Amino acid sequence: MDFLCEIVQALVALAALGLIVVLVVAHVTAGMVNLTRHEKEKYFLTASGKKELFPSLHDPHSRVLSVVIPAYNEELRMPVMLEEAMEYLENRQKQNPSFTYEVIVVDDGSKDKTTEVALGYTKKYGADKVRVLTLVKNRGKGGAVRMGTLSSRGKVILMADADGATKFADIDKVEAGLNDLNPKPENMAISCGSRAHLEKESVAQRSVFRTFLMFGFHFLVWFFCVRGIKDTQCGFKLFTREAALKTFSSLHVERWAFDVELLYIAQCFKIPIAEVAVNWTEIEGSKLVPFWSWLQMGRDLIFIRLRYITGAWKLESSHKTD
């Protein structure tokens, strides 16, 4: 009996030591919010090739809608999405001339012709409607979305994936979800597109291993960071300008788990969040490597919470970029 007690005590001591080590590693390796941008990233090209300075999210809005599209090596998939988006946006503007918009394609350090393809739309529609922000180095999807958001002019800002997996017309659904939140007086609200209604179908199509990874990820999200949101990872989210400034100013994670930290920050600030079912189709060419990407996201989820607990990360007041 004494021997068993000693084993239990030893295991408890090891667990405590392990927790301390993880806390120390999480704290020491925590990076700070990186809002600096290279000189080249401060400008966009007009249809004639002239350089002009991007505006700031701190400025008053001058468009109804900004669409931010992060793109990494998307020269093949992006045109389909852009054609669908531009057709919707142009038709909406024809029906309602007071509706104004901009599309910001953020090339996240691509090695292909993503920038050139996007600039073709600038030449077709003009830089007032389509702008391209080319990042000098790859930051990750979260970093790309943040840089585009910080350069936007919209009263509301939509984050949309370049692969076109979500039907663009479903913006009507997420807009309705945003309006239902009644974000006044501070105008803080976020509406998230969701694929949770498709989960049963996806489980039937996935392998047992990938299904296990998916449910494991959902559990970590719920346990460590975000409660009440079934699908944190859908790349179709609509922010009021005020909510975007509040959340993106504190964002640290720039890779795949950035959505989770973004929603964690929003819940810490008590920003209302709606979750709205959208049409979604899996598109070939995903940049996610199933096992390693899930592993990285799992690590990031644990570290997100631990870094806020230890004070390595703090919720920031909104401040300007350099």
Image (cartoon, rainbow, N blue to C red):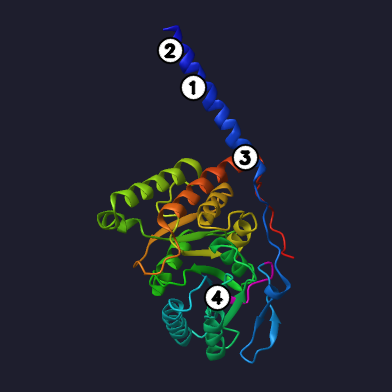
Q: Which mark is residue 25?
A: 3
Q: CA distance from mark 1 to mark 3?
A: 21 Å
Q: Which structural element holds mark 3?
A: helix
Residue underneath mark 4: 105
In percent of width and height, residue 199 lies at: 31, 55
Going by the numbered disc 4, the residue's amino acid type is Val
In the rendered image of this protein, does residue 257 appear above or below residue 93? above
Looking at the magenta stretch, what is its main secondary structure?
loop
Q: Which structural element holds mark 2?
A: helix
Label whose residue precedes the other's in the sequence (4 or 1): 1
Residue underneath mark 2: 4
Going by the numbered disc 2, the residue's amino acid type is Leu
Eye-nearest disc, 4 or 2? 2
> At 32% across and 49% down in the image, what residue appears?
209
Eye-nearest disc, 4 or 1? 1
Q: Which structural element holds mark 4?
A: strand
Q: Which mark is residue 11?
A: 1
Crowding at dot 3, Cα within 10 Å, few <14 / some 14-19 / many 20+, comes out as some
Label whose residue precedes the other's in the sequence (1 or 3): 1
> At 53% across and 87% down in the image, what residue appears?
120
